[in-house]
Structures are given as structure tokens and as C-alpha cells.
């Protein structure tokens, strides 16, 4: 224990510390409240001396007690409170901390096996791994079967109670370590990421698409720590503004920001250098420049003074065949002004050897070649990806001219077109220019036709059009057929079935609205399916099952989908086979339930919501209106259950009318109340008992009857002394008054009382004699005391001698003072 004197007087509620011991370190000049001083066993005392005044602070270094328990095993059980902890503690309350620590890279899973807590017992489970601890659970959500997981390798469980725990108080927990992991790294825009694994030691590799350069590390490692983390930030894939590209064999150059818009006031220069003995060919993938001073120049050389082979200022249309260098260098220049911007440019380059044709290329398509070196005589045949159509070139090209090899035709282009007639059994219909944006004011119609004894299934995988654009499906070969569906805006994947072998698709875009950006439009896959007298078989769903009203799926068959506990149906749970042999809706899914039902409102109260509306972890607090008191828990928490739907932690409380209390009715000095306080709540009872030697007159228990105001059911009882107790008290009083006389005092009392009694009997006999001669009756009083209705203090006895200390003569006189209303006749 250390002690120090301070040279200034602190406020009454503070104790200033000049020296504070905390383990092996010292803290100087701190300030601590009295409440905190109590927790740390600190005492403060004011002092005043000739040198001044101040406070003496005493600090006793805390010693870990039996209520601080550490667990380091990878798994185990925790019983709270520990029996030895309660037995060794001399304090009326309990404050115990249980710390679980496992190896780095591991977390802690805690399961509640049994819980039985009483009012006043508080329990918190905290994750201690971060800069600040975070609460995982508390006593309001603890229930049998609850499982919580930490984000780090250390948790703290604190149990507090204002009094010693009762024998039935118990919280039994089971914990075990599990491997923590890093979060999946974010994939960079215009790039890709691959991960070996997410646990400590796992590696994430990043790479960019052609034309983009990686800004940042190419590889990150998941590091082992309290909470595992990646060794650095995810890199970015950016298009550079210029650069020297040596040994350029195959690649792309894209304008900064592509496929988004480029910036203003750019000047970018690239120099392409092919390997020795090779030339360069450039193919234009995309060109979208603002109609002002933005410009793309390609020059046949390695510097800005080289002659141009392409100038966006001079050429209105892009050359489908691209441009070819005469040597091994090309110089590319991209400049923008300070006004409007656009998407920019994307060009593809490849090197080819002398004596061969350059390698062919087709975007959104593929090709086959008779010679992979593309020498003279090589024949190449092109084909487009499903949904695209060949345009602007020949399907087959050939490499000619041995002296100056070149293709006899330009390469074709594959583009998603507006309208068409399709007779394939399966295929794709794409919005015009997909995946680039479609033009405004378009009216496109596609007709799909399959075998007469078949019908068509439409799988709409992407639908992301403007709110004023319209995509319509007709169940037939023209626009007069029944409409299967009509859609605009954005919708998730869905399917449609025709009743016949033809379907017509119409797309109309708003003429007044432009749509920008990649991925806007639609993608519709179609398949030829059998047409019979039954609907198609519906699939099973994950985390659920289906039941069918008829095994053959004929018209009118109903299929009902249901989910396992803890999941709910998203979509229509009942599907019917319709007259056109299509199902009435899409197949639903079973999604994990992450919300609690609305707990409802409580009459005469308001409620306060925290977190997302009724999501797991959110709370609802009920606050009663003025004049009402809460019965039940004020806070309800929505918690998750693995095998069932989320549930509220408590039942809905009630707000009961609050009655005014009864005041203390008071009690005579000869009686004792069962509970002494200023106010008693409505419905509360109060009992009275008399002191020794007194008898009770009235009801021993009264009750505070609810009302406005509340009133007692009756007046308090009274306590009266008995005659035998009076005589005993007189004798005791005389004995106490003269304790030194012993037996002599007792003899004096007898000597005085016996003659007095004889004189009294003589006087009474004479009085009775003369009264009898005169024919009068004697009336003795039965009660001469006032009623007790409003008494707050009562005499000790009915004997006026003891009360006033007068002589026996006065008692004789009182016998003559009779009550004319209440008398008895003496014979």
C-alpha cells in the first residue's frame, strides 16, 4: 500500500492521485471518482495542517481474485458462477470475469447449454480482439442452444450480481476454437483475382485484362493475427496514358477510363515496337470520341513526326481491315480538349512476320484456319457467337500475294442486330449492340420458329432496360397473338413457355431517352421443348421440397413448394399447370430467414426500433405512457437460430395502470409495523403487532386499496395494557426507582399498600351501607376513553394512576366519576 499527500483540496466527489500503482507502472497526477476508488480499493481522507490542506489517498494494488478465470484450452466448458468463487467472496455481490484465449488465427465458438438467470444477474460476452471490445451477446438474448462466434482469438465473459447467486442460478457454456479466415479479396475493375485459400497463409493473385496495368501488389497473403487480414490493399487495374511497349506481339491499348468516359485535357502517346523482322497490325475494337477536338492519331513510325496511317479528324468511318505498319514501329497519339467527353478508344495490335498475313480477329465471334501461321494460301472461316450476326465482311477469307501477303477480303464484324427470323431449335436473342448500349427510338421484332409439334421455352437471363422501354413476348407468329408477358425496367431471371411452335419478340426503346453503359439491354435464351398434354417437370429447390397434387402434371395440377425450418419461400409457393400447359409462375427459392416477425404494439406505450427493421440483431424497446408502469422486459432483441426462424428474446410486455400509493398510516408507540416506509404501493398489505403486555383491538392487517387516490382498507388497530401488567409494572417501577434498598424497599411497599387497602375497604363499606339505606344503585363505568378513530399516539394503560403519577386517593375519586350512558348494577 502506498500513500501520498496532495497540496490542494479536491472537490467532494473526486479524489486526486499523485501516485497510482498499476502493476509495474506508475501513473501520476490522475483523477478518479469515489465510485472508481471503491472498485480499486482506494480510500481518501481530507487533512489540514499548518502547511496547507489536501487529501490523503490510499491505493491498494488489486490482486486477482477467485472470480477471474482464464481458459486457454482449444475447447472446454464454463460453469457460471463458479462455486468456489461465491464461497470465497465476502462481498454481498459477485463480479466474475472469464477470459478464453486460443491460438492466433483461430476464433471461439460459444454454445449455451443451459441458462437460468434471475433478476439482477447481468451477463455479457465480448470480443476482445479489436481496438475496442464488441459485445457478442448479453443476458437479454441468452437462451439454450444459442451459438455466437468471435472475430478474434479472445473473448471475455463477465457475470455480475448485486447479491450472492442463488443455488439455482446457472449458466453452462461450451466453447471450441475454429479457424478464422480472411474475407474474400475484392476483384479489381477490369481485372481478375484467384485465391488459394482464405485461411492464414493463403494467397490471392491479381491480374488485369489486356490493355490495363496493375497498380499495386500482384499477390497478397492472409496473415495470421488476432483477426486474420490481407497483407495489403487490393490493387487496381488502370489504363495508362501512354507508354513504350517493346516486343509488342499481341495486346490492346485503351484510353484512360475505358469503358467509362475519358477525362478532359489529355495528351497520351504510345510507341509500339514489334520484334525484329515483324510488322504491326492494328484492329479497331471501339471508337467513340466527342464531336469536337478529341482526336486519335496512328503514325507509321516511332515518333510524333512520323507520317499518319489513321487520323480520326480525316476519316469518317473506321477501316474494317484496320491499319498495317511498313516497319516494326507504330506511334499512337490520343488527345482531348476541355469540354465534352465520351467512351474513348480500344484498339487491338498484333505482330506478324514478313511473308505472312496478319492474324485475323473478330469480336464476339471465332474462326478456323487451314494454316495457323497464316502463310500464303491460308483460308480462314468466321462464325459469330450465339445472338450475333456477321456483318461488313466475308465469312471466308484467304491469304494471297507471296511478295506482299494480304487477305483478299476484310474480316467480318459480329454484331447484335435489331430484328431477325430464327429457325434454330435453340439460340439467343440479344438487345441491339449488346453488351454495349442500344440506340434510342428503336422498334425491333424477332420471330422464332421451331418444329410444329414442339413449343418454345424462353429463359430471360438479363433484363435491364429503361423504364420507358418495352419488351413484349407474343404467343404466336405475329403481333396479334396473345401476350405472354410485357416488361420494362429491371427484373431478375425468369422463364416463359409458349403454347405453340412460334413466338414473336418485340423491343421498343424510348425515342427521347439515351441509355449509357455496358450491360444495359436484355439476353433471352430459347429452347425447343416437347408439346404434349402435360406441363413440364418442375425442379426441386435447395433447402426445401415440393409436393404434387397429380403425378402426371396434367392441366389443373398444383405443385406446392415448402422450405425447411429457418428458411422461407421467396416467390409463389403454389404453382398451377394452366390451360396452355405453362406453370402459373416461376419456381420459387428458399432463402434464409433473417428477420423476426413484427412483435406488435403494446397498449398505452410507444416503441423504439434500432437497426434494420426487425433484422437479426435489431431491438425493439417499449416505453409506457405517463401514468402506466411496465410489466415484463422493456427490450426485445431479434436473434438468429440455426434450425428455426429468428425469434424475439422476450415475450411482449404490458403497460399497467399506475395507482397512487398510500401514505404511512402511522402506528401507536405500543405497536409495531411489519414494514416501515413513507409510501405503500396499491395492493400492498401492512401488518401490526402489539408490544408485550398489550392486547390488540382491531384488525391486525390492513391493505392499500387501488384508487385515485389509493386508500387503506381500515384504520390501524390499537394496543391496550392489561391490569395484571399494570401491577407488575408498578412493582417493577418501585424496584427500579430504589434499587439500593433490596428487601427493605419491598417491605416498605407492603407496609404502605396494606393499610391503604384496609382504609379503602372501610370507606367503601360505609358508602355502600348508606347507599342501601337510601335505596340508590351504584353504576360502574365500562369505558370512559374516547374512540380510537383518529389516534396517532396511545396511552400506555387504561389506568390513570400510571399515566399521571397521582396517589391512590385520586383512583378512589375516579370510581365516583361514572358514565351515565354505560353502567353496571352492583348488588
Image: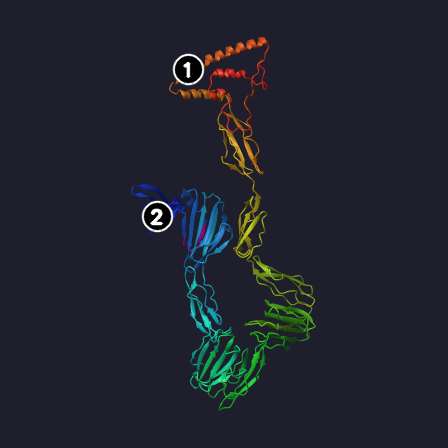
Residue 646 position in % (x across, y down):
55, 55
Is there CB contact under 8 Å for labels 1 and 2?
Answer: no
Q: Which residue is mark 1?
A: 748
Q: How would you rate the neighbour count of disc 1 (Cα within 10 Å): few for under 14, some for 14-19, many for 20 or more? A: few
Q: Quadrant of the N terminus?
A: top left
**Circle nearer the viewer, 1 or 2:** 2
Q: Nearer the viewer, residue 450 or 310?
A: 310
Q: Which residue is mark 2?
A: 17
Q: Label 1's element?
A: helix
Residue 299 position in % (x across, y down):
46, 84
Q: Is residue 507 magenta?
A: no
**What whole-number distance in Å separates the C-alpha atoms at marks 1 and 2?**
72 Å
Residue at 55 percent across and 27 percent down: it is 788
Q: How many marks?
A: 2
Seen in the image, is 268 located left or right of residue 445?
left
Residue at 35 percent across and 42 percent down: it is 45
The tag on residue 549 is: none
Seen in the image, is 31 located left or right of residue 474?
left
Residue 100 position in % (x across, y down):
42, 54
Residue at 41 percent across and 50 percent down: it is 69
Q: Quadrant of the C terminus?
A: top right
Q: Determine whether 390 is above or below 104 in the image.
A: below
**Residue 604 visible in this rendered orientation of the protein:** yes
Q: Which residues are magenta?
A: 71-78
Quadrant hosting residue 386: bottom right
Q: Nearer the viewer, residue 84 or 552?
A: 84
- Check the image and name the residue furthest to the top: 773
Q: Label 2's element?
A: strand
Q: Determine whether 362 is above or below 743 in the image.
A: below
Amino acid at each position: 500500500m502506498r500513500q501520498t499527500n496532495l497540496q490542494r483540496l479536491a472537490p467532494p466527489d473526486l479524489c486526486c492521485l499523485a501516485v497510482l500503482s498499476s502493476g509495474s507502472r506508475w501513473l501520476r497526477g490522475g483523477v478518479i471518482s469515489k465510485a472508481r476508488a471503491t472498485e480499486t480499493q482506494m480510500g481518501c481522507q481530507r487533512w489540514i495542517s499548518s502547511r496547507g490542506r489536501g487529501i490523503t489517498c490510499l491505493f491498494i494494488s488489486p490482486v486477482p481474485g477467485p472470480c477471474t478465470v482464464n481458459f486457454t484450452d482449444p475447447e472446454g466448458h464454463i460453469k457460471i458462477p463458479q462455486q468456489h468463487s461465491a464461497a470465497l467472496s465476502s462481498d454481498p455481490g459477485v463480479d466474475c470475469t472469464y477470459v478464453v484465449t486460443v491460438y492466433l488465427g483461430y476464433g471461439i465458438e460459444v454454445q449455451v447449454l443451459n441458462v437460468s438467470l434471475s433478476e439482477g444477474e447481468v451477463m455479457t460476452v465480448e470480443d476482445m480482439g479489436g481496438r475496442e471490445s464488441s459485445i457478442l451477446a448479453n443476458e437479454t438474448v441468452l437462451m439454450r442452444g444459442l451459438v455466437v462466434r468471435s472475430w478474434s482469438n479472445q473473448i471475455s465473459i463477465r457475470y455480475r450480481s448485486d447479491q450472492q447467486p442463488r443455488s439455482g442460478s446457472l449458466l453452462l457454456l461450451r466453447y471450441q476454437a475454429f479457424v478464422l479466415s480472411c474475407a474474400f479479396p475484392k476483384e479489381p475493375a477490369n481485372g481478375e483475382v484467384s485465391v488459394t485459400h482464405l485461411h492464414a497463409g493463403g494467397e490471392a493473385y491479381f491480374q488485369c485484362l489486356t490493355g490495363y496495368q496493375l497498380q499495386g501488389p500482384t499477390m497478397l497473403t492472409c496473415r495470421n493475427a488476432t483477426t486474420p487480414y490481407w497483407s495489403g490493399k487490393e490493387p487496381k487495374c488502370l489504363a495508362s496514358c501512354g507508354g513504350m511497349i517493346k516486343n509488342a506481339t499481341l495486346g490492346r491499348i485503351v484510353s484512360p477510363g475505358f469503358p467509362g468516359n475519358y477525362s478532359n485535357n489529355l495528351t497520351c502517346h504510345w510507341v509500339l515496337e514489334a520484334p525484329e523482322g515483324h510488322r504491326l497490325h492494328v484492329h479497331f475494337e471501339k471508337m467513340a470520341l466527342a464531336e469536337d477536338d478529341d482526336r486519335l492519331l496512328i503514325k507509321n513510325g516511332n515518333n510524333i513526326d512520323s507520317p499518319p496511317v489513321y487520323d480520326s479528324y480525316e476519316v469518317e468511318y473506321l477501316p474494317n481491315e484496320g491499319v498495317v505498319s511498313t516497319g516494326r514501329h507504330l506511334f499512337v497519339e490520343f488527345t482531348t480538349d476541355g469540354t465534352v467527353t465520351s467512351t474513348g478508344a480500344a484498339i487491338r495490335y498484333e505482330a506478324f512476320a514478313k511473308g505472312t498475313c496478319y492474324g485475323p480477329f473478330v469480336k464476339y465471334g471465332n474462326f478456323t484456319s487451314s494454316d495457323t501461321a497464316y502463310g500464303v494460301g491460308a483460308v480462314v472461316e468466321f462464325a459469330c457467337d450465339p445472338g450475333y450476326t456477321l456483318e461488313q465482311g466475308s465469312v471466308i477469307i484467304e491469304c494471297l500475294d507471296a511478295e506482299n501477303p494480304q487477305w483478299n477480303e476484310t474480316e467480318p464484324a459480329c454484331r447484335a442486330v435489331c430484328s431477325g427470323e430464327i429457325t434454330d431449335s435453340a439460340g439467343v436473342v440479344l438487345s441491339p449492340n449488346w453488351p454495349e448500349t442500344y440506340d434510342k427510338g428503336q422498334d425491333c421484332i424477332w420471330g422464332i420458329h421451331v418444329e410444329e409439334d414442339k413449343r418454345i421455352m424462353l429463359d430471360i437471363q438479363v433484363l435491364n432496360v429503361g423504364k420507358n422501354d418495352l419488351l413484349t413476348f407474343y404467343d404466336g407468329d405475329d403481333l396479334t397473338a396473345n401476350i405472354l408477358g410485357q416488361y420494362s425496367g429491371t427484373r431478375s431471371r425468369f422463364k416463359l413457355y409458349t403454347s405453340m411452335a412460334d413466338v414473336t419478340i418485340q423491343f421498343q426503346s424510348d425515342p427521347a431517352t439515351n441509355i449509357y453503359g455496358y450491360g444495359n439491354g436484355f439476353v433471352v435464351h430459347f429452347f425447343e421443348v416437347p408439346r404434349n398434354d402435360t406441363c413440364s417437370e418442375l425442379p426441386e429447390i435447395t433447402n426445401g421440397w415440393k409436393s404434387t397434387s397429380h403425378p402426371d402434371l396434367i392441366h389443373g395440377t398444383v405443385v406446392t413448394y415448402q422450405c425447411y425450418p429457418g428458411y422461407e419461400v421467396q416467390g409463389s409457393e403454389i404453382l398451377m399447370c394452366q390451360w396452355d400447359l405453362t406453370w402459373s409462375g416461376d419456381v420459387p427459392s428458399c432463402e434464409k430467414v433473417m428477420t423476426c416477425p413484427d412483435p406488435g404494439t403494446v397498449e398505452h406505450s410507444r416503441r423504439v426500433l434500432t437497426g434494420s427493421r426487425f433484422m437479426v440483431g435489431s431491438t425493439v424497446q417499449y416505453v409506457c405512457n405517463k401514468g402506466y408502469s411496465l410489466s415484463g422486459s422493456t427490450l426485445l432483441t431479434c436473434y438468429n437460430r440455426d434450425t428455426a426462424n429468428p425469434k424475439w428474446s422476450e415475450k411482449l410486455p404490458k403497460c399497467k395502470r399506475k395507482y397512487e400509493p398510500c401514505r404511512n398510516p402511522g402506528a401507536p408507540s405500543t405497536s409495531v409495523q411489519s414494514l416501515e416506509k413513507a409510501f405503500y404501493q396499491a395492493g400492498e398489505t401492512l401488518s401490526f403487532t402489539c408490544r408485550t403486555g398489550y392486547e390488540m383491538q382491531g384488525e391486525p392487517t390492513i391493505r392499500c386499496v387501488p384508487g385515485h387516490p389509493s386508500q387503506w382498507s381500515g384504520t390501524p388497530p390499537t394496543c391496550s395494557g392489561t391490569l395484571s401488567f399494570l401491577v407488575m409494572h408498578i412493582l417493577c417501577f418501585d424496584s427500579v426507582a430504589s434499587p439500593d434498598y433490596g428487601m427493605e424497599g419491598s417491605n416498605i411497599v407492603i407496609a404502605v399498600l396494606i393499610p391503604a387497602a384496609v382504609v379503602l375497604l372501610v370507606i367503601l363499606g360505609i358508602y355502600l351501607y348508606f347507599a342501601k339505606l337510601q335505596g340508590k344503585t351504584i353504576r360502574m363505568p365500562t369505558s370512559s376513553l374516547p374512540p380510537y378513530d383518529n389516534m396517532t399516539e396511545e396511552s400506555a394503560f387504561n389506568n390513570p394512576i400510571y399515566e399521571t403519577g397521582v396517589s391512590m386517593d385520586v383512583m378512589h375519586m375516579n370510581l365516583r366519576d361514572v358514565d351515565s350512558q354505560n353502567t353496571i348494577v352492583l348488588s
